Amino acid sequence: MLDLATGRDMPTSRQTLLFSATFPPNLQALLPSLLRTPYYKVEVGKTSKLRDETAIKQEVKWVPTHAEKLQTLLADIKAFWASFDSSSSSSSSSSSSSSSGGTEVGPAPGESPGAAGAAGAAAAAAAGVEGDQPKNPKKKQQQQQQQQQQQQQQQQQQQQQQQRQQQLQQSVNCHFCCC
């Protein structure tokens, strides 16, 4: 479309908005001739890594019906994102409570099905909510070790989730200019 917009066909009293996932050098060279000065450039996300067009992964998926578009989109999003109800004791109860009003969710890729339950137990322990405390010192020590392991697992899960969020943000970066 920019091949047609050489400037001669554009009215002088115009507002021009350019949207692009990337602004390659040949498009950046056109900006001064297409936009009034001063023009504003807005970048969303970490754009320094996306200057090169090869950093963007694009996929085209043909979906036969309009109704299947949402399901296809949600399937793609689930690969990057998982939602857990921190108050539930296991991921299966999270799935059932979430699926009643929306899309069913479960453990994130690479996480065990009981990971959400372990995270919930660790959070409860950190908050001072205690269950049945054993009177046997060895059992108490074992329980403390289990809690430490659960906390470590929770920290690893949080790091994995942050990495997935960063990947998602990097894949949805957008640039646009307007004048």
Image (cartoon, helix red, strand yellow):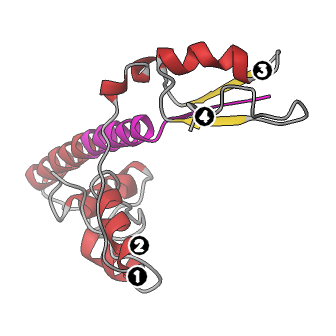
49 or 109, nearer to the observer:
49
The secondary element bearing badge 3 is classed as loop
| N-term mark: 2 or 4 | 4
Mark 1–mark 2 contact, CB under 8 Å? yes
Residue type pointed to by label 1: Ala
Q: Residue at x 58, y 32 (%)?
A: 2
**In-image side of 24 versus 159 (left or right):** right
Q: Quadrant of residue 12?
A: top right
Sort mark 4 into few (<14), some (14-19) or many (20+) by Cα contacts within 10 Å: few
Taking the view exactly as shown, the residue that stands out farthest to the right is 13
Residue denoted by label 2: 70
Over which residues does the magenta segment extend?
154-179
> Residue drawn at (77%, 20%), measured in percent from left and top?
39
Going by the numbered disc 4, the residue's amino acid type is Leu
Residue matched to label 1: 67
Q: Position of residue 146 (x, y in %)?
A: 16, 50
Which residue has dot 4 on it? 4
Which sits in the foreground, 148 or 61? 61
Q: Could you tell me how far apart the alpha carbons at marks 1 and 4 are, in whole angstroms? A: 36 Å
- Looking at the image, residue 155 lies above or below residue 43: below
Tag 1: Cα neighbours inside 10 Å, few (<14), some, or many (≥20)? Answer: few
The disc placed on residue 82 is none
| Label 3 vs 4, first from the N-terminus | 4
Gap between marks 2 and 3 measured at Cα: 36 Å
Quarter holding the C terminus is: top right
Disc 1 and disc 2: Cα gap in Å?
A: 7 Å
> Which residue does the numbered mark 3 point to in the structure image?
39
